[in-house]
Image (spheres, rainbow, N blue to C red):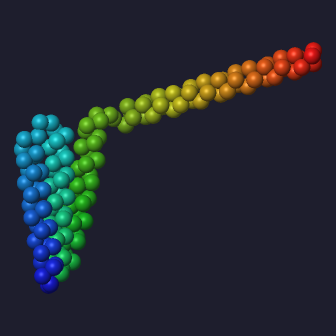
Amino acid sequence: MTLVTQVLIGATVVVLVVSALFALYRLAKGPTGLDRGVASDVIIAVLIAGIATHAIAARMSVGLIVILILSLIGFTSAVGLARLITGTSARERRFLEAEARAANISRERAERERLQRERLERERAERELNEMEGEA
């Protein structure tokens, strides 16, 4: 391994350790559950990066399986946290989606009516203008 590679791996390890310490601090002190959830996601990401760094330094591919498993765990925990935070069930989501569709339909109808009123007003103004020109 070259000196440049060793320096880069050493710098990576330092950054990962500092990141893990900050994330652990946020995990312990976080004022809300959301802060703690994000900190746990960061810790998983740091673990993934650390295992990848070790796999590169040791020139081993075994760490890739562990990285894959950790990334799946991180993804499912992030999705679970997002659903927990939103607090909506599938039934509530369907209701909200139907409500949004109805609002869009109403907005589109109002826009069509406005455009029709403008068109009728334009046609009326053109008729009046034509009548004025015909009288002159």
Looking at the picture, tell me which residue is in the foreground, 69 or 50. 50
Residue 58 visible in this rendered orientation of the protein: no
Report x, y in % for residue 17.
8, 61
Residue that appears at 18% across and 65% down: 49
Report x, y in % for residue 42.
18, 53
Q: Residue furthest right?
A: 135
Instruction: Tell me: residue 89, above or below residue 9.
Output: above
Looking at the picture, tell me which residue is in the foreground, 66 or 43. 43
Judged left or right of residue 37, residue 75 is right
Residue 6 visible in this rendered orientation of the protein: yes
Q: Quadrant of the C terminus?
A: top right
Q: Residue furthest front?
A: 136
Instruction: Tell me: residue 41, above or below residue 52.
Output: above
Instruction: Tell me: residue 50, above or below residue 127.
Output: below
Judged left or right of residue 95, residue 48 is left
Count of numbered circles on the image: 0
Q: Residue furthest bottom?
A: 1
Judged left or right of residue 121, residue 114 is left
Looking at the picture, tell me which residue is in the foreground, 65 or 27. 27
Residue that appears at 14% across and 84% down: 1
Residue that appears at 12% across and 68% down: 11
Looking at the picture, tell me which residue is in the foreground, 37 or 23. 23
Residue that appears at 23% across and 71% down: 64
Report x, y in % for residue 4.
15, 79
Judged left or right of residue 18, residue 120 is right
Report x, y in % for residue 71.
24, 60
